[in-house]
C-alpha cells in the first residue's frame, strides 16, 4: 500500500507541475528585442477569423493578446466592442497575466459592462457597447481577450490594419475571411508585402493574411494617413442583404442604387409646407437665390440631432416626419431639403461622404461602403452646389474642410457615380492680415490688426461667432501668438455669401515691441505672424510627408515710425520657391512708414519620406526671414 501511495503522490506532483507550466503564458522576456524598440505596447498575438454564412449573416471569432509596457498605452488594454440590434457579441473571455506570464486574474462575466453607446449629440441610438477595464497598473502586464460577433448586416465587412497604432509593435497577426465557394469576395491590399493566401475546399474559400514581427513606429510630424504607408486590407461584399433590402457592391453604381432604395417613398413633403415655401420664392430670383431660400427655410425650421437606428443607421426617416418634428440627422435633413428642391424642379442628389478633417479617403478603384455622413449635391444649369444640411449657419453652396477635396458617392436610382468635391486653391484658403502698428521710442507699440479668413478657414473660425463675449475674448487671446500683449478691444464680422469671409479686428497694446541697443532701435519686422516653431529634424523617418490642404498667408504690415527716428537698414528681400510651397517678403520705406509685404504658401501633396528634411529646411528659411530685423536710428 505504501508503494501505491508514493506513486499517487508522485503522479499528482507531476500533474501539478504540468498545470503550473501551462499557466505561464506570454512572459515579457519572450518578446524579441527589436519589437521593444519605440514600443509602449506589443501585440503578442491577434487573430480575427470571419465566416460569411450567407448574404445576410456573418460571424467573427477574435483573439487578441497585448502586453502593456507603459502607462501611455494603458487604453490599449481596454476591451470595447460596439453592437446593435443587428449584431450580437458573446463568448467573451478576458485573462490578465503579469510580466512573468503568470495568470493573475480572469475577468468575471459580471464585471463586463454593457451599456448604451448613445453619443452626447444624439437624440437616439440603438447602439450598445461592451466594456472591460482590467484595472491593472503593475507594468508590464498582458491581457488576453477572446470573443465572437454575429451580425445580420453584411453591408460592412472587416477592415484590417496590422498596426494597432503608434508605438505599438506586432509579434503575430492573422486575418481571414471564409466565404461560400460561389461567393465573390471583394478585397483590396495596401502596402502588403505578403499577399493573400487562399485556402480552398469543396464548399468554401478562405482568404487569409498573416504578418509577423512588425516594429513599432513613433509619431512623426506631418505624417500621412495610415492607409498611405501601413499594411491595410479592406474587404467588401459582392451581394449583400439588410432586412428586406438587397444590394450589390461590384460597382459604385450598384452601391448607389442600393441606397436609392432606402430613400423610396420618403419625399412626402406636406402640402402646407410647399405652399409656405412658394410664398418665399420671388419669380425674378435666380436659381441660386431660390435654392438658397429653400435651404435657409430648412436651416431656420430644423435642427440637427443624430439618430442612429434601424438598417444599420443607413435609412433616413421620411420628409413628413422631419417637417412635423423639426429635427433630423444628416440623412433625414438631406432627404428633406432634397425632397423640397426636387418638387420645385431642381435636380438634387443625396450624397454619401466620409466626412471629417482627418477622415480616410475613399478609394476610387475599390467599391466599399466607408461613408459616415450624408449631404446634398444640387445640379444647376451652369453650376453645382454642395449643401451641408446639418449646419444651421452655413451659406448655401459653401463647402468646408468637413467635406471638401474628397470622393463622394452621388446616389441615384440609376447611374450613381463617384465624384470629387471642390478643393481650395492656396489663394482661396487664405489668412490675410492688414496691420497698422505705431511704435514709440520707448519700445511700446499700438497695433490695429484686421484679419480675414476665407476658404476652409472660414468654417474653422466661424465658431467664434457662436460664443458669448467672455468666451470669445478668451478664445481670441489664446489664438494670439505674440509675446507680451494686451487685447484692448475687438470686433468680428461675417460676410455670409457663397464664398464667405470672416473678419476679425483687434486692437492691441504691445510692450517691449522693439529692443534698444545703444542709440539704435531693433525692430523685428514680422513679430505679428512669424513662423517660429519648426518640426524636429528626422534622421530615419518612416512615413511620407503629407500636406493635406493648399494654404496661404498674405500680410501687409505698416509701421508708423516716430518723427525723431529714421531707418538705417532693412532686411534683404527674400523669394523662396519649392515643390512644397513658397515664400516672399520685402520691405520698403515710404516717408515715415515702413511697409512689410509677406506671402507664405503651402501646397498640398504626398511627398516621399526622404524629402521631409528638405521641407523642414524650407520652413527654417522662412523662419529666419520672419525673424529678420530692421534697424532704426535717431535722425540727428
Image: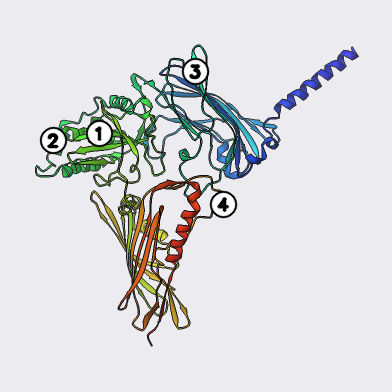
The numbered mark, 4 or 1, whose residue comes first in the sequence reads: 1
Q: In the rendered image of this protein, does residue 529 appear above or below residue 139?
A: below
Determine the CA span between mark 4 and mark 3.
Answer: 45 Å
Q: Going 81% across and 18% down the picture, which residue do you hit?
A: 11
How packed is label 2: few (under 14 Cα within 10 Å), some, or many (20 or more)? few
Determine the CA span between mark 4 and mark 1.
Answer: 49 Å
Q: Quadrant of residue 330?
A: top left
The numbered mark, 2 or 4, whose residue comes first in the sequence reads: 2
Determine the CA span between mark 3 and mark 1.
Answer: 39 Å
Q: In the rendered image of this protein, does residue 88 appear above or below residue 280?
A: above
Residue 92 location in percent, x, y?
56, 25
The answer to whether the residues at label 3 and label 1 have Cβ atoms under 8 Å apart is no
Residue matched to label 1: 349
Q: Quadrant of residue 568?
A: bottom left
Q: Nearer the viewer, mark 2 or mark 4?
A: 4
Task: Tell me the element at label 3.
Answer: strand
Q: Going 40% across and 47% down the picture, which residue do you hit?
A: 605
Q: What label sits on residue 205 in the rendered view?
A: 3
Q: What label sits on residue 539 in the rendered view?
A: 4
Q: Which residue is outermost to the left?
A: 283
Of the 4 image quadrants, the one containing the C terminus is bottom left
Determine the CA span between mark 2 and mark 1.
Answer: 23 Å
Residue 329 seen in the current view: no
Residue 529 seen in the current view: yes
How packed is label 1: few (under 14 Cα within 10 Å), some, or many (20 or more)? many
Amino acid at each position: 500500500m505504501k508503494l501505491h501511495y508514493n506513486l499517487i503522490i508522485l503522479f499528482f506532483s507531476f500533474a501539478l507541475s504540468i498545470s503550473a507550466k501551462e499557466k505561464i503564458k506570454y512572459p515579457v522576456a519572450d518578446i524579441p528585442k527589436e519589437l521593444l524598440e519605440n514600443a509602449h505596447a506589443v501585440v503578442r498575438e491577434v487573430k480575427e477569423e470571419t465566416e460569411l454564412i450567407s448574404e445576410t449573416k456573418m460571424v467573427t471569432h477574435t483573439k487578441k493578446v497585448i502586453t502593456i509596457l507603459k502607462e501611455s498605452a494603458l487604453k490599449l488594454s481596454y476591451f470595447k466592442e460596439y453592437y446593435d440590434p443587428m449584431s450580437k457579441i458573446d463568448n467573451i473571455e478576458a485573462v490578465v497575466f503579469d510580466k512573468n506570464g503568470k495568470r493573475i486574474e480572469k475577468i468575471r462575466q459580471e464585471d463586463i459592462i454593457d451599456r448604451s453607446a448613445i453619443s452626447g449629440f444624439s437624440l437616439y441610438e440603438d447602439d450598445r457597447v461592451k466594456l472591460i477595464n482590467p484595472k491593472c497598473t503593475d507594468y508590464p502586464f498582458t491581457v488576453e481577450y477572446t470573443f465572437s460577433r454575429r451580425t445580420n448586416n453584411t453591408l460592412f465587412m472587416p477592415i484590417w490594419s496590422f498596426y494597432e497604432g503608434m508605438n505599438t509593435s506586432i509579434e503575430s497577426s492573422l486575418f481571414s475571411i471564409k466565404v461560400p465557394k460561389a461567393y465573390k469576395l471583394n478585397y483590396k491590399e495596401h502596402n502588403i508585402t505578403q499577399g493573400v493566401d487562399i485556402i480552398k475546399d469543396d464548399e468554401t474559400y478562405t482568404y487569409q493574411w498573416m504578418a509577423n514581427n512588425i516594429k513599432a513606429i513613433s509619431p512623426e510630424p506631418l505624417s500621412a494617413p495610415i492607409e498611405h504607408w501601413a499594411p491595410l486590407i479592406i474587404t467588401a461584399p459582392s451581394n449583400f442583404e439588410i432586412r428586406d433590402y438587397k444590394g450589390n457592391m461590384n460597382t459604385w453604381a450598384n452601391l448607389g442604387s442600393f441606397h436609392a432604395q432606402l430613400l423610396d417613398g420618403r419625399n412626402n413633403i406636406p402640402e402646407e409646407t410647399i405652399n409656405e415655401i412658394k410664398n418665399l420664392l420671388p419669380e425674378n430670383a435666380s436659381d441660386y437665390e431660390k435654392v438658397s431660400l429653400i435651404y435657409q427655410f430648412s436651416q431656420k425650421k430644423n435642427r440637427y440631432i443624430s439618430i442612429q437606428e434601424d438598417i444599420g443607421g443607413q435609412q433616413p426617416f421620411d420628409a413628413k416626419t422631419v417637417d412635423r418634428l423639426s429635427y433630423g440627422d444628416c440623412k433625414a435633413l438631406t432627404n428633406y431639403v432634397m425632397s423640397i428642391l426636387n418638387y420645385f424642379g431642381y435636380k438634387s442628389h443625396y450624397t454619401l461622404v466620409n466626412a471629417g478633417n482627418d477622415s480616410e479617403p475613399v478609394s476610387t478603384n475599390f467599391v466599399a461602403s466607408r461613408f459616415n455622413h450624408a449631404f446634398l449635391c444640387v445640379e444647376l444649369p451652369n453650376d453645382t452646389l454642395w449643401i451641408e444640411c446639418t449646419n444651421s449657419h452655413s451659406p448655401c453652396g459653401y463647402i468646408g474642410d468637413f467635406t471638401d477635396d474628397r470622393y463622394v458617392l452621388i446616389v441615384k436610382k440609376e447611374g450613381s457615380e463617384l465624384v470629387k468635391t471642390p478643393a481650395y486653391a492656396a489663394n482661396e484658403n487664405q489668412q490675410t492680415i492688414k496691420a497698422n502698428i505705431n511704435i514709440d521710442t520707448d519700445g511700446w507699440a499700438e497695433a490695429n490688426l484686421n484679419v480675414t479668413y476665407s476658404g476652409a478657414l472660414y468654417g474653422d473660425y466661424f465658431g467664434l461667432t457662436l460664443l458669448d463675449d467672455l468666451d470669445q475674448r478668451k478664445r481670441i487671446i489664446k489664438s494670439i501668438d505674440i509675446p507680451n500683449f494686451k487685447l484692448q478691444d475687438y470686433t468680428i464680422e461675417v460676410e455670409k455669401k457663397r464664398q464667405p469671409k470672416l473678419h476679425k479686428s483687434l486692437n492691441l497694446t504691445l510692450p517691449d515691441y522693439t529692443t534698444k541697443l545703444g542709440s539704435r532701435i531693433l525692430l523685428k519686422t514680422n513679430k505679428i505672424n512669424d513662423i517660429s516653431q519648426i518640426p524636429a529634424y528626422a534622421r530615419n523617418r518612416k512615413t511620407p510627408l503629407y500636406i493635406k490642404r493648399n494654404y496661404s498667408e498674405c500680410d501687409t504690415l505698416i509701421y508708423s515710425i516716430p518723427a525723431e527716428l529714421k531707418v538705417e537698414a532693412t532686411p534683404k528681400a527674400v523669394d523662396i520657391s519649392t515643390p512644397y510651397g513658397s515664400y516672399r517678403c520685402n520691405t520698403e520705406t515710404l516717408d515715415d512708414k515702413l511697409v512689410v509685404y509677406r506671402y507664405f504658401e503651402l501646397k498640398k501633396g504626398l511627398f516621399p519620406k526622404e524629402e521631409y528634411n528638405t521641407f523642414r529646411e524650407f520652413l527654417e528659411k522662412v523662419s529666419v526671414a520672419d525673424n529678420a530685423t530692421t534697424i532704426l536710428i535717431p535722425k540727428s
